[in-house]
Amino acid sequence: MKRLCVTLLLFSLYSATATAQIRYGVMGSVQASNVASTVDLTSLGPTLGTLAVPINQRVGFRAGLMADIPLTDRLSVRPQLLYSVKGGNVDVGTFVANALTRVGLPSSTLSIGTPISKVVVNYIELPVMVTYGFEAGPGRLVVGAGPYAAVAVGGTINGESINFDTSNFHKHDLGATASLGYELPVGLTFSAYYTHGLTNFSKNSTPNFAALNPTNPTASLDPSAFGGTLRNRSYGISIGYFLDHH
């Protein structure tokens, strides 16, 4: 995925020297995000299988710069450089109760003092999409898809800062994105998008229920403390403006 992003960027720069003028713009989005997460319980018993972690959506935003590099009259490469706020509200209490039930224990065996973990992770994100435009009314309908790469630059769990050097989270993320939008001749753009993270950013691969001891609330706040997979998901709506809209 990293190689694909770099290849698309280099191809964009090369193409820009031989095609029409590059357009630059700004954009902002309101997005809903969560994290797809499962925990493999087979280390506790071969028939226990995997268990989904209930993580509810949270509303965030993303904003930054964009460019349009024409390859033909209809085909373009569009890199973006964005600040993106992602995360989710992790229902740790429900997960622990479900896990205890799965292993044959009463759900009340372990009580979690903070049943909901509010996780916020802030990324610098670089999507690179190939877009195709169709004439539609006064403007153009534009569809696009491509990879993205991101690096976390900060975050919190229930208001406490995440130290990515010592926490259970990896800071890098790779994935894919797709969008559908409409552009007006005056430079305004409106679009809806979806991003699908492919990188598991949890450092733990196996359950560690000792980390969920209610007498150790700091550990119990970290949804990756008990192991498993964590992958970003988000979707939203964007409005943008190209500064040069000839």
Image (spheres, helix red, strand yellow):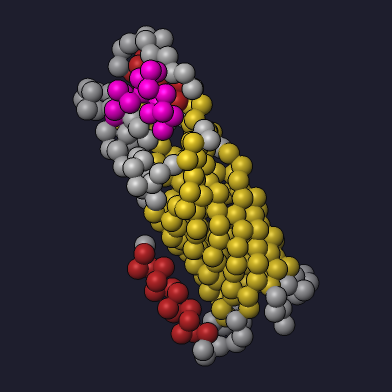
x and y, in percent, of residue 190 in the image: 69, 61
Horizontal relation, residue 142 to residue 91: left or right: right
Q: Quadrant of residue 229?
A: top left
- Residue 25 drawn in magenta: no
Name above or below for residue 142 compared with residue 114. Answer: below
Horizontal relation, residue 24 to residue 213: left or right: right
Closest to the observer: 63 or 99? Answer: 63
Closest to the observer: 74 or 39? Answer: 39
The residue depicted at 55 percent of the width and 53 percent of the height is 84
The residue depicted at 52 percent of the width and 33 percent of the height is 158
The residue depicted at 33 percent of the width and 36 percent of the height is 228
The span picked out in magenta is 207-222
Name above or below for residue 4 compared with residue 70. Answer: above
Name above or below for residue 86 compared with residue 214. Answer: below
x and y, in percent, of residue 195 in the image: 51, 53
Figure quadrant of the N terminus: bottom left
Q: Quadrant of residue 225?
A: top left
